[in-house]
Amino acid sequence: MDWIRYPGRDSWRDLLKRPEKDLPSLEAVVSDVFNRVASEGDAALKAFTERFDGVVVEDLRLTPEEIERAGGQVPQDLKDAIDLAYENIYAFHAAQKTGRVEVFPRPGVHCWQEKHPIERVGLYIPGGTAPLFSTVLMLAIPARLAGCQEVVLCSPPGRDGNLHPAIVYAASRCGVSTICKVGGIQAIAALTLGTESVPPVYKLFGPGNQYVTQAKQWAGRWGVSMDMPAGPSEVLVVADHTAVPQFVAADLLSQAEHGADSQVVLLTDREEIMEAVNQALEAQLDDLPRQEIARQAITHSRGIVLKNWEEIADMVNLYAPEHLIICHREERFLLEQVHNAGSVFLGNYTPESAGDYASGTNHTLPTNGYARQYSGVNLDSFLKSITYQRLDAEGLREIGPSIEVMAEAEGLRGHARAVGIRREYLERGLTNAITKP
Ligand SMILES: NC(=O)c1ccc[n+]([C@@H]2O[C@H](COP(=O)([O-])OP(=O)(O)OC[C@H]3O[C@@H](n4cnc5c(N)ncnc54)[C@H](O)[C@@H]3O)[C@@H](O)[C@H]2O)c1
Ligand SMILES: N[C@H](CO)Cc1c[nH]c[nH+]1
Ligand SMILES: [Zn+2]
C-alpha cells in the first residue's frame, strides 16, 4: 500500500478520492435498461440477464418447491450460523422500535405522530462475485419487524442459472416468499416499474456495485425511493502503536476483497506502524483466494501519516467512511470528534466482519462519502411517520389568530379564511351548528 506522510490540508480532498465509474456512461446504460424494461417487461429482464450475467433464465420467479428445496442444500453448520446472526440482528433492530410521540403544545391542541410500515418494499441482494446471503438478513429482518406487507427480493442468478441456496434459505427463514432471479440494473428497473414476474415496490433497499447504485438513484425519477447509495465497500482504519498490525491488515483486506473498486484507507500518527502493516498485508494477500480483486482495490487505497489525532478526526469527517475502525490510544477523543461514518468498530477485538455478519448492527451502509448525510439501514428505513392533530374550540381560539396573521403575511387569504370562518362561528355562539363527527 502506498503511504503518504504529513500531507498538507489543501491536498486532502484529492488524496481521498474514491475510484468511480464515468457517470455519463453509467447513466446511459441505466436509462437504456429502464426504458426497455418499461416497454418489454420480463423479456427485457431475460435479455439483459443473458447479456450482463451470461446466463439464460426461463422462469424469473422461484416456485415454492424451489424455495423448499434450497433449505436441504444448506449445510447444518451454516444454518446454525445464520440462526445466531438472525437472533442478534433481530434483537438489535427490535430494540429500535419507538412509541407514539404525543404533545399538547397549547390548551385544546393535540398533536401526535405514529409510524406505519411502507407497504411494498424491494430488497436487492448482491450476487455478482459473491452471494451475499448475509444481506438477506440485514434487509428482511427489519422489513418484517416493521410490518411491510409485500417484500420482494431480487438477486442475480449464478453461472448455473440459480440463486445460491443460502440466499434462498435465508430469505425463507425471514419469511420472504417472493424471490426473483434477476440482478443488476434490470432488477432495480423491474422493482421500480413492475413486470409480469416482478411486482413493483415503493422503496428499494440493498447494496450493490456501481450499476446497481446508479440504478437505485435513477428509480427516483419514477417516484420510487431508496434507502441510500450503498455502493462499493470501504473501510477506514485509525490505528496507532496499540493496534496489532496483523489485525489492521486483515481488516483492510476484508473490505478490499469485495471488489476491485473497493477502497481501504489507514490513518495513523505513528510512523512506526507503516512497515509492519505493509508486511502483514503482503503476507496475508498471498493466500487470499480473492487476492486479484483485493490487489486491485489496494492500488487506489492508501495509508496516510498525520500529525496528531486532531488531524485524524478532521480527515475521517472529510472522508465519511462506510466503516470506521478505531484502534488508537485516543479512542474517546476520536469518538467525540467524529460525526461522519456509517458504522464504527472499536478496539483490537472488533473486526469489521463482526458487523458484516453477526454482531447485530446492519451492514447496509452509505458509501462514497454519503455517511455525511445518510444513516445505514435500520428499522425506521422501513417505516413512515404520519403526524396527526386535533384542535377543539379552545385550541382554535389559542392559535387561530397567529395562523391568520401568518397566512395574511404570506398573501394567502384562503388559508386565513379557513381559520377565520370557524372563529366567527365561535364568536357568534353558533357552536350548536357544529356537530361532532
Ligand atoms: N455499501 C454496502 O452496504 C455494501 C454491502 C454489501 C456489498 N456491497 C458492495 O456490493 C457490491 C456487489 O457487487 P457485485 O458486482 O458482486 O454484485 P451486484 O449484484 O451488485 O452486481 C452484479 C450485477 O451487475 C450487473 N453488471 C455487471 N457488469 C455490468 C455491465 N458492464 N453493465 C451493466 N450491468 C452490469 C450484472 O447484471 C450483475 O448481475 C460490491 O461492490 C460490494 O462492495 C456494499
Ligand atoms: N462489507 C459489506 C458492506 O460494505 C457487507 C458484507 C456482506 N458480506 C460480507 N460483507
Ligand atoms: Zn464485507
Image (cartoon, helix red, strand yellow):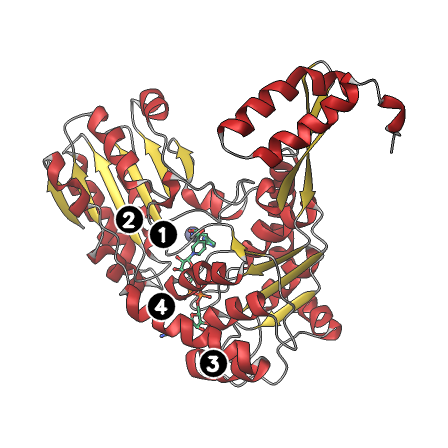
Query: Does dot 1 land on a helix, a strand or a loop?
Result: helix
Q: Is residue 5 left or right of residue 186?
A: left
The residue located at (62%, 39%) in the rendering is 93
Q: Which residue is mark 4?
A: 27
Quadrant hosting residue 10: top left
Pointer 3 residue Cβ closer than 8 Å to ligand 1: yes
Q: CA distance from mark 1 to mark 4?
A: 26 Å
For disc 4, the neighbor class at 10 Å (few under 14, some 14 to 19, many from 20) is some
Does the Cβ of the disc 1 residue fall within 8 Å of ligand 3? yes
Of 323 and 248, nearer the camera is 323
SS category of the residue bearing label 3: helix
Q: Is residue 22 above or below residue 33?
A: above
405 up-or-down from 289: above or below: above
Tell me the residue at 28%/28% (across/down): 242
Determine if residue 240 is in view: no
Which residue bears the numbered disc 3? 48
Dot 1 amino acid type = Gln
Choose mark 1 or mark 4, whichever is in front. Answer: 4
Q: Is residue 158 above or below residue 272?
A: below
Is residue 258 something that shows in the picture? yes
Q: Nearer the viewer, residue 329 or 220?
A: 220
Query: Which of 160/427 is in front?
Result: 427
* Residue hosting label 1: 255
Q: Which residue is identified by label 2?
A: 264
Q: CA distance from mark 1 to mark 2?
A: 7 Å
Name the mark nearer the viewer: 3 or 2: 3
